[in-house]
């Protein structure tokens, strides 16, 4: 039975196609009323398939889907009280914006006064009033996206399903629409399930992120928790821009980490080392990970993090206004440092330092994080 506190519950849901290919494995998730859930991951990870199973556009091979207290495995899409916003907008080209918004209500034979009331409320909320008599070809990409969202709003659904709705927009418009979607979620106080391969969208929009890989959930947590404490190498590398730095090395009995390719010895924070030692990793190969945000090259931090000093062989630098991305090699492994403009990198090498309280250690075989 479904979790009584959840508006949607997926229990051990699997998707297996007739040819035997399995797209989703043992998917378990409880979604609370009013949550903004983002399912993220690379192409082919199973996120859109899962969304389509919730919508009823894909059959569930095994497991249970509960929506608003009702088992919905065999319920037709139109009877699930959900609304979906697609990547390609799926607007009717021959209809005006008004009729695009009204169409789903017309075929449900809703009273005409109620239709007009809902359409005008959605149009006002989305800034579409001036465009109600236009056809989709007369609209910009952002305006078409608003119409697609408005068509979902007028239905007053239990859940909104959004499948990469911003992927056809340019970068500036995407940023603007992210803000609008977040505000809309708060206005409607509704449940959103949003699919994207863009981890920036995931971090900025979600109450919780569900990261998927090869049909399996890798981690489900708040954006902050996922950024600060990725459970495995995949999540660590997927979440965060620029991506996490990874270094092979060995854990020593004296509480240090020896980087294999450079021979540099770094001091592990005492509590972190105790956790690693208790799990039996002393003398073993591990992977140390550090976000570019916690790699520094200014004098003040050398004294602050004395156990984290290393030499970076410079490659190139990207100037991004308030900060620069410095690319180079630590030994023979890639290192990116996100530094402020006052921290100028010059010459062939530069002295840097890790904030060793912010690093993570992973088992190279299981790929799971080993420090608490």
Image: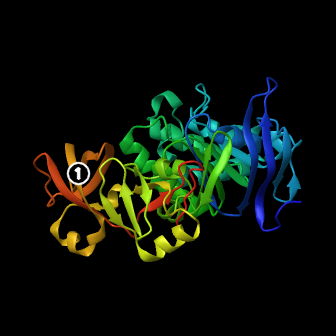
Position of the N terminus by quadrant = bottom right
At x 71%, y 64%, the residue is 32
Q: Position of residue 309 (x, y in %)?
A: 25, 63
Q: Residues within 10 Å of mark 1 (few under 14, many from 20)?
A: many
Near-viewer residue (190 or 115): 190
Q: Position of residue 40 (x, y in %)?
A: 57, 47
Left or right of 27, for residue 125: left
Left or right of 178, for residue 311: left
Q: Is any atom of residue 268 visible in this view?
A: yes
At x 49%, y 27%, the residue is 137
At x 51%, y 47%, the residue is 129
Label 1 sits on a secondary structure element that is strand
Near-viewer residue (342 or 321): 342
Relative to residue 13, is residue 190 depicted above or below? Answer: below
Position of the C terminus by quadrant = bottom right
The mark total stands at: 1
Relative to residue 312, is residue 143 depicted above or below? Answer: above
At x 59%, y 40%, the residue is 148
Left or right of 159, for residue 72: right
Task: Pick out the residue farthest to the top.
Answer: 19
Q: Position of residue 228 (x, y in %)?
A: 47, 64
Relative to residue 121, is residue 131 depicted above or below? Answer: above
Near-viewer residue (334 or 189): 334
Near-viewer residue (14 or 309): 309
Q: Position of residue 7 (x, y in %)?
A: 76, 60
Mark 1 — residue? Answer: 312
Q: Is any atom of residue 319 visible in this view?
A: no
Q: Quadrant of residue 289?
A: bottom left
């Amino acid at each position: 039975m479904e979790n009584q506190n959840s508006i949607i519950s997926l229990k051990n849901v699997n998707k297996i196609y007739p040819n035997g290919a399995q797209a989703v494995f043992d998917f378990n998730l409880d979604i609370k009323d009013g949550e903004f859930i983002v399912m993220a991951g690379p192409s082919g990870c199973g996120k859109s398939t899962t969304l389509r199973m919730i919508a009823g556009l894909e059959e569930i091979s095994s497991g249970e889907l509960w929506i608003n207290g009702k088992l919905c495995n065999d319920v037709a899409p139109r009877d699930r009280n959900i609304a979906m916003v697609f990547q390609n907008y799926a607007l009717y080209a021959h209809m005006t914006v008004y009729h695009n918004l009204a169409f789903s209500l017309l075929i449900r034979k809703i009273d005409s006064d109620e239709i007009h009331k809902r359409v005008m409320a959605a149009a006002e909320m989305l800034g579409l009033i001036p465009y109600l008599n236009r056809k989709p070809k007369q609209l910009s990409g952002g305006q078409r996206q608003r119409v697609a969202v408005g068509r979902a709003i007028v239905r007053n659904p239990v859940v909104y399903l959004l499948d990469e709705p911003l992927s056809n927009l340019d970068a500036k418009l995407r940023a603007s629409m992210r803000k609008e979607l977040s505000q809309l979620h708060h206005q409607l106080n509704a449940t959103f399930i949003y699919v994207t391969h863009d981890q920036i969208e995931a971090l900025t929009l979600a109450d919780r992120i569900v990261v998927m890989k090869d049909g399996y959930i890798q981690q489900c947590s708040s954006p902050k928790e996922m950024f600060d404490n990725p459970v495995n190498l995949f999540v660590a590398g997927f979440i965060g821009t620029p991506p996490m730095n990874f270094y092979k090395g060995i854990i020593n009995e004296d509480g240090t980490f020896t980087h294999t390719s450079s021979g540099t010895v770094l001091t592990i924070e005492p509590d972190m080392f105790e956790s690693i030692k208790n799990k039996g990793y002393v003398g073993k190969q591990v992977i140390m990970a550090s976000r570019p945000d916690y790699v520094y090259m200014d004098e003040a931090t050398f004294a602050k993090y004395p156990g984290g000093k290393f030499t970076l062989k410079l490659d190139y630098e990207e100037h991004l206004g308030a900060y620069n991305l410095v690319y180079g090699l630590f030994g023979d492994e890639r290192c990116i440092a996100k530094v402020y403009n006052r921290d100028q990198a010059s010459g062939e090498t530069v002295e840097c330092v890790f904030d060793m309280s912010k690093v993570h250690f992973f088992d190279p075989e299981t790929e799971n994080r080993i420090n608490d």
